[in-house]
């Protein structure tokens, strides 16, 4: 292997571009301070900060409030319950947390913000008022908790994640904060992530929109709303959390589950940007690449965390201002600076050493009607199917014990690919979700739905 393949050190030009980006963000965003970090290849490879205060600036150990990135932590706790078999995403909330009055929503809908709940709590702005003013779930939900019928559309809901935090407490029989610490923070070594600020931490500031002056923001304990936005953390802890979200950790969640969390479970939200939402993760595209992560804000603080699994790059940006600095946008830009400036080396090609003749029989060209497709067996044992020279439905498939193949992606995700054999054992055709793929276009020897004209192919007479 080329030594460069294993070199995680960033080039000087890349490091300068990263420093320049956060310098511009701090200056144009008029933020008292900003701190950022980038991970690549499972390691922290860059940290930087800018501050309006002379002398020592913040570093990766200084806590900032992370707002709605807290939701992703809560989602991880819920997915742990699912993986342990203690609940299912299709379960109605009422099954595990009775008496809320909104129990018809499913756990999965709450995770994906498709439960139809209102975006905010009734009464005063919850982010700037103490949680003691909302001591019960009824105070969080109000008399009219729904904005839409459950399951009909994406509608971001802070009260929804309060319900998920209460769900975790009900199933575990312990406070959300205690479960978070024991099941997520401690296993991942996130010692500087906490529900209450721990020194050293930044103060939250409001910067006047039309004058270069500022004043401190209140730092409230959010009470029941804590699972939606309470946490404080550092760029180093969040970088480790981002690496977990890309690769998983069997002590918390496996790779398959974190990948599921980053799979769209709600329709895109159109606005200044187009977002989708997974299970506790925002999904977007930036610079032609797919990103998963979350933004966050509370009075006095903004935060952004994005991961690009394809590039194995993650970035975190934290600032202590109420508005002005687009932390999520800056984090996406940092991912792009590294991924574009230093493209990831592909893994070396290796042959598939355990290829079976049965799988090889399926490789090569196939036809869905007249549309040419090709099936390839790749070295990790999957089958890949895609159109030849045209746009169409591509998918990957994993072998199943019964000899079929399960769709993993795209239109055919969850569908079954089956090789149908003739009496002599040779493959007649492929059956995929009722579609027949044949070795020749409209093969008359295969059971093509609707049949094949007995006169066959011909020109215009």
Image (spheres, rainbow, N blue to C red):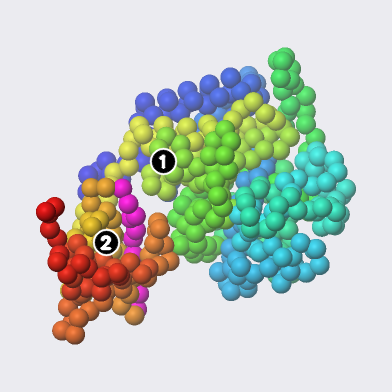
Q: Find residue 437 and report its horizontal and vertical position in percent.
A: 26, 66
- Label 2 neighbourhood size at 10 Å, few (<14), some (14-19), many (20+)? some
Q: In the image, 313: left or right of 121?
A: left
Q: In the image, 169: left or right of 236?
A: right
The answer to which image quadrant residue 252 occupies is bottom right
- Label 1 neighbourhood size at 10 Å, few (<14), some (14-19), many (20+)? some
Q: Is mark 2 on a helix, strand or loop?
A: strand
The answer to which image quadrant residue 305 occupies is top right
The residue that label 1 is drawn on is 289
Q: Which of the two residues, 346 or 288, is positioned nearer the viewer here?
A: 288
Residue visible at 86% across and 43% down?
123
Q: In the image, 336: left or right of 219?
A: left
Q: In the image, 96: left or right of 19?
A: right
The residue that label 2 is drawn on is 368
Q: Which of the two residues, 120 or 448, is positioned nearer the viewer here?
A: 448
Residue visible at 65% across and 63% down?
107
The residue segment tinted magenta is 391-401
Q: Is residue 76 visible?
A: yes
User: Which mark is first along the chain, 2 or 1?
Assistant: 1
């Amino acid at each position: 292997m080329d030594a460069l393949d294993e070199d995680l050190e960033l080039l000087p030009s890349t490091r300068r571009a990263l420093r320049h980006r956060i310098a511009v963000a701090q200056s144009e965003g008029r933020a008292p301070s900003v701190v950022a970090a980038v991970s690549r290849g499972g390691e922290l490879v860059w940290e930087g900060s800018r501050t309006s205060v002379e002398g020592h600036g913040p570093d990766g150990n200084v806590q900032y409030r992370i707002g709605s990135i807290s939701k992703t932590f809560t989602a991880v706790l819920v997915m742990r319950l699912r993986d342990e078999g203690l609940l299912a995403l299709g379960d109605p909330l009422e099954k595990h947390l009775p008496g809320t009055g909104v129990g018809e929503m499913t756990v999965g809908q709450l995770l994906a913000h498709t439960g139809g709940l209102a975006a905010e709590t009734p009464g005063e702005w919850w982010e700037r008022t103490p949680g003691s003013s909302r001591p019960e779930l009824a105070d969080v939900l109000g008399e009219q908790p729904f904005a839409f019928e459950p399951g009909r559309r994406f509608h971001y809901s802070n009260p929804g994640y309060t319900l998920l935090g209460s769900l975790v407490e009900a199933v575990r029989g312990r406070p959300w904060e205690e479960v978070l610490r024991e099941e997520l923070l401690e296993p991942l070594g996130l010692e500087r992530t906490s529900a209450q600020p721990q020194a050293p931490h930044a103060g939250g500031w409001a910067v006047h929109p039309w004058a270069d002056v500022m004043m401190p923001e209140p730092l409230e304990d959010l009470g029941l709303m804590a699972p939606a936005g309470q946490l404080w953390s550092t760029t180093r802890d969040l970088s480790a959390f981002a690496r977990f979200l890309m690769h998983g950790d069997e002590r918390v969640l496996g790779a398959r589950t974190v990948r599921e969390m980053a799979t769209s479970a709600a329709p895109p939200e159109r606005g200044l940007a187009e977002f989708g939402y997974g299970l506790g993760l925002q999904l977007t595209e930036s610079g032609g690449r797919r990103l998963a992560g979350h933004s966050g804000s509370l009075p006095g603080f903004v935060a952004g965390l994005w991961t690009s699994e394809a590039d194995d790059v993650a970035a975190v940006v934290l600032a202590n201002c109420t508005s002005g600095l687009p932390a999520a946008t800056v984090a996406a830009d940092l991912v792009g600076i590294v991924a574009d400036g230093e493209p990831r080396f592909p893994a070396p090609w290796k042959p598939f050493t355990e290829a079976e003749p049965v799988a090889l029989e399926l490789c090569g060209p196939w036809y869905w009607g007249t549309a040419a497709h090709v099936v390839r067996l790749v070295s990790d044992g999957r089958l890949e199917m895609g159109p030849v020279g045209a746009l169409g439905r591509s998918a990957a498939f994993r072998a199943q014990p019964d000899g079929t193949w399960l769709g993993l992606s795209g239109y055919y995700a969850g569908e079954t690919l089956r090789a149908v054999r003739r009496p002599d054992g040779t493959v007649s055709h492929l059956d995929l979700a009722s579609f027949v793929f044949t070795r020749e276009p409209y093969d008359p020897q295969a059971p093509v739905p609707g049949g094949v004209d007995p006169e066959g192919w011909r020109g215009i007479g």
